[in-house]
Amino acid sequence: MGDAALSARALDTLLGEWRGASDDTVYGALAERIRLLVIDGRIPVDTRLPAERDLAERLQVSRATVTAAYGRLREQGHLHSVRGSGSVARLPGAPAILPAPLAGAHVDLSKAAPPALPWLADLARAAAEDLPRHLGDAGYDPVGLPELREAIAARYTARGLPTDPDQVMVTIGAQHAIALLSRAVVGRGDRAVIEAPTYPHAYEALRAAGARLVGAPASPADLGDVAAADDVEALVRTFGHANPSIAYLMPDFQNPTGRSLSAEARERVLDAAARQGTVVVADETTAELDIDRADTLLPMAAYGDAVLVGSVGKTIWGGLRIGWIRAERPLLRKLLAVRPPGDLGTPILDQLIVARALERMDEVIAFRSAQLRTGRDHLESLLADALPDWHVPHVDGGIATWVGLGAPISSQLALAARTQGLIVAAGPRFGIDGAFERFLRLPFCSPVDVLDASVAALARAWRTLSGAPVADPGLLADVV
């Protein structure tokens, strides 16, 4: 049995408005919502569910209702029970700790990342020619190749933030960087401020390090200056009352909302964090994906003390697992101390490929900007025609838009979309408390034919919501 356990109170929060959502019976609606939470990853596989009596009392239903719901989940393979040991979440047809493989016929919009650069294979061949001069030692590199750290530092300097290569550590992607920082900075029970909504795997890394999460609102990109000012004010207040040890923010084209912090907002946030001694981690994985933003903004650390995280997953290719941390040397030394239990270094060949790619980064950004403009405009047009009642924010960069559905049915829609051949992450996947049922993240970084198929599937799914959609079993949407 798994070590993780979900209390009745926590499950009640995750369930949201579940009664009558997708089944004529109370127990059927409860079972269906729990099944969706497991499929969508909000109840991790191997998590022990609450005892039937506790959940019945919390939900104010009969114990027979919960017993019947758990029974249906067991029949479907989403729950495994052992007398005296409780009931544990499962995914049918897959190992307990792994998601089931995606069916080939499904379009996957849960991963907001573009295809590889067209010239990436040429860069890889050129990098392979550089490899022999690195083969004379064991190849374990916990800091990063000098030429790559120099290239990363040069890129920051070109963007207006003077940087020394000794301020850079190369990691195995941005997610690895976030996990390292979480382990180095967070003590068990420390508070961590995150935006709400935010990137799920970031708050999962903080939670795994023992942090208690405190959310601050991040409004959709097009709600204007008043909403943005309210968000900043709320974030500043959160620093004051939570006294967090760390804050994870995405100041540029935030995932999933697409909004950016102004220069003035960055200064205010960093001033508030400095007063509390909070380490601000600014995730810059989408920072250079500008389409037509009016303002030119510097990296967050140009406005005050901030640790920067970057990667090439959204610009060059997600299959190149290269990221980095820009920080002051004392923190980098601490990161080096906590790194070995997790990994012993970043792959050399991948680093050489990225070093080559960074030489052409202006070309890369121009290519991505044009690609994203096409995708954004095409998605907006498709949604206006097929789903005109939805609110589709116009973002000026990034990889996705945070669509308002007009009703708290994002989870139902994600479930229905699976039956139409589309994998999409429901809005609550980006929150920590089951919120955001009125929203859906839709990436626009896929080719236009993929967007065509995706919106067609969403429109079909939307029309089925008055029925009782049944998801393909065993599909778990991971989110990037």
Image (cartoon, rainbow, N blue to C red):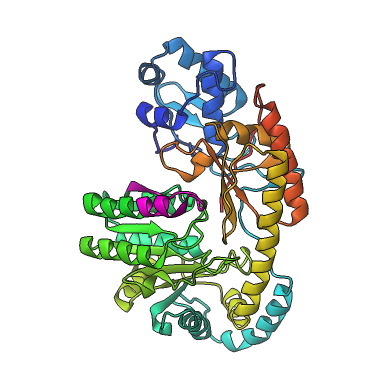
Q: Is residue 218 magenta?
A: yes
In x, y percent, where is residue 360?
63, 81
Q: Is residue 46 visible?
A: yes
User: Number of labelled discs?
Assistant: 0
Q: Is residue 375 magenta?
A: no
The front one of 323 and 18 is 18
Viewed as shown, does residue 353 lie left or right of 230? right
Q: Residue at x 52, y 85 (%)?
A: 147
The image quarter in which residue 426 lies: top right
Q: Which residues are magenta?
A: 213-231
In the rendered image of this protein, does residue 18 appear above or below residue 449?
Answer: above
In the rendered image of this protein, does residue 478 appear above or below residue 418?
Answer: below
In the rendered image of this protein, does residue 202 appear above or below residue 301?
Answer: above
In x, y percent, where is residue 421?
73, 39
Q: Residue at x 59, y 89 (%)?
A: 133
The front one of 139 and 110 is 110
Q: The C terminus appears in which quarter of the rendering?
A: bottom right
In x, y percent, where is residue 420?
73, 35
Viewed as shown, does residue 396 lie left or right of 118? left
Viewed as shown, does residue 67 lie left or right of 400? left
Q: The N terminus appears in which quarter of the rendering?
A: top left
The image quarter in which residue 361 lies: bottom right
Q: Residue at x 59, y 13 (%)?
A: 24
Q: Is residue 208 visible?
A: no
In x, y percent, where is residue 329?
33, 78
